[in-house]
Image (cartoon, rainbow, N blue to C red):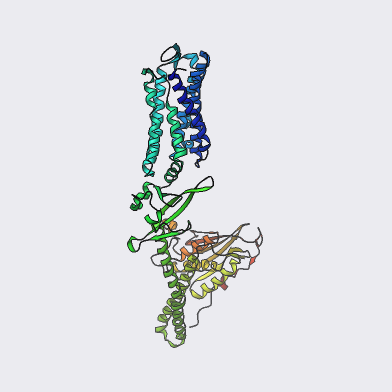
Amino acid sequence: MDPVLLAHVSVFSASALACVAAVPRALQIRHPETREGFVALLLAVTLWAGGYVGYLVAPGEAAKVGFYIVGFVFALFAVAAWLYFCAAYTGRSPRHAPYRRAAAAVFAATALLKFTNPVHGLYFSTAWTTEPFPHLAIRHELLYWAVLGLSYAVIAVGFFMLLEQFFYTGTDSRPLIALVAATAIPTVGTVFGASSPRLLPLMYEPPGVALFALGTLFVYFRRFQTIQFAAESDAAAVFLDQTGRVRDFNRAARLLFPELRDAVGEPFDAVLPHLAVDRGEDDVIRVGSGERQRFYQVSRNAFTSGGATSGELLTVDDVTGRETYRLRLEERTEQLEALNRVVRHDIRNDMAVVHGWAETLRDHVDDDGRDALERVLRKSEHVIELTELARDFVDSLADDVAPETKPIDPAELLEGELRAARDSYPEATFRVVGELPSVTVRANGMLASVFRNLLNNAVQHNDTETPTVTVESEVTPDRVRFRIADDGPGVPAELRPELFGKGRKGIDSTGSGIGLYLVSVLTEQFGGDVWVEDNEPRGAAFVVELPRADGEGEGEGDGRPAESAESVRPPPSPE
């Protein structure tokens, strides 16, 4: 066999065999789309190189042309597989690429033109020749060179993706960069093959792909995978070998920990001892103190080969902002709990004493002092009310989990709060229209605070001398609704979107500004809703809607008798 022919057959045969041998290794790639792209590339190059071998050694012109077309078509498949692999490896999912259907249509049309070349001859023609040895020579036409140029443009895009990945995510990625560069070397043979006396006008890229496959899959496989894992996250990544020594790290790690710059080959626990602590993935490591204090969360992923651990990937997240905020919240929670204890015990107890002593003065003041005494009593009652409100507010926010609820009778709680409101506001009239329903809802004792705040709000925001508050209820198969309406100035439409926000109160309100916010928080915890609407002919109506806990339809129409309008107004205070 002629030496030039033997060299061509040997090179393409070796390329095909190398690609076939690399397929099982490529199937071990963890990332699904990268695995698909690499395996497709290897199989396409195998058929590409195999077709060229058949073209060189097959007897007869028809067989040679047939084998050449096989290699010619699968060369195009290899270009598509290369781009698919590069996109997947660098985190650009090919399945979600823009214009992918149009690209697939162009690819299919080009492959069809190649396959049908014997009919139209737009790609190549053939003629027997004796140089550099007797063979069926291929003469490429203009369409071949145009498609080759476009193919190289597509391949260059893939090269750029890989090199960008290696540059930004790995410090010790030089071997992989060298492999990518070596893949492009055979392109010289493709471009200048027609003018060289010892080269045939073929595409010589299969040896380059085979070299890239052998290098990445058998020599630098772990590095090849770890660089991809590092690029999938913006977090810092450090790669250790089985002895715990630093083998590589990404750019984010180098910027976060300058100590890594010259640390390849050094024990990790000597380079970054504060991160080498064996912790669970949920543990946070504190580094430094004062203003230089940082918090890091380290996750570990072991690399295994044949059942044995061959290395480890450490992903380091800087969670300083999150942890600082958490610590600040813990500190504020402790302060809030301390304030709650003061409010519940000291202030409330002292004001209860003040209110009790003031009550004893009712029979010891003359008419001139009675008004002042009444003001003292009202203010002391208001302070006691505020302590209860603050207590309820803190209790509603104290737990990180949803509060425990049980079937509870809302009408019983509402009746109790109505009695308390009549005692607190003797100048106001509280009316119950119809019957309070005998149903249950899923809540707890804090539901009383919802009713209490809405009843107090109806009086405190009222601009009439004798406020009237009307309570109505409505029951559906799965919900119960309470409507607490007043005859005050109402709520302007522009204030309603923020009405239940923390700290919202009217200019002349005597409230604390958190009552309606507490109503909103508690109602949401019970799975219900609250909103405000206009009352007719004047005022605002707050509607609380809660899901029922009893059977559907039970209790409907079976309510408590409503008190008459005359009975709800308390008797005048004794003079």
Question: In the image, 154: left or right of 304?
Answer: left
Residue 114 percent location from the top left of the image = 48, 20
Residue 216 percent location from the top left of the image = 44, 38
Q: Is residue 487 visible?
A: no
Residue 329: quarter of image: bottom left
Q: Residue at x 50, y 82 (%)?
A: 574
Q: Along the line of sight, which residue is nearer the eye, 20 or 367? A: 20
Residue 434 percent location from the top left of the image = 60, 64
* Location of residue 282 with respect to 72 vertically, above or below: below
Question: In the image, 573: left or right of 406?
Answer: left
Count of labels in the image: 0
Residue 462: quarter of image: bottom left
* Location of residue 308 with respect to 343 vertically, above or below: above
Q: Along the line of sight, which residue is nearer the eye, 225 or 465? A: 225
Q: Along the line of sight, which residue is nearer the eye, 524 or 94? A: 94
Q: Is residue 175 visible?
A: yes
Residue 158 percent location from the top left of the image = 41, 33
* Location of residue 433 with respect to 50 vertically, above or below: below
Q: Residue furthest bottom?
A: 364
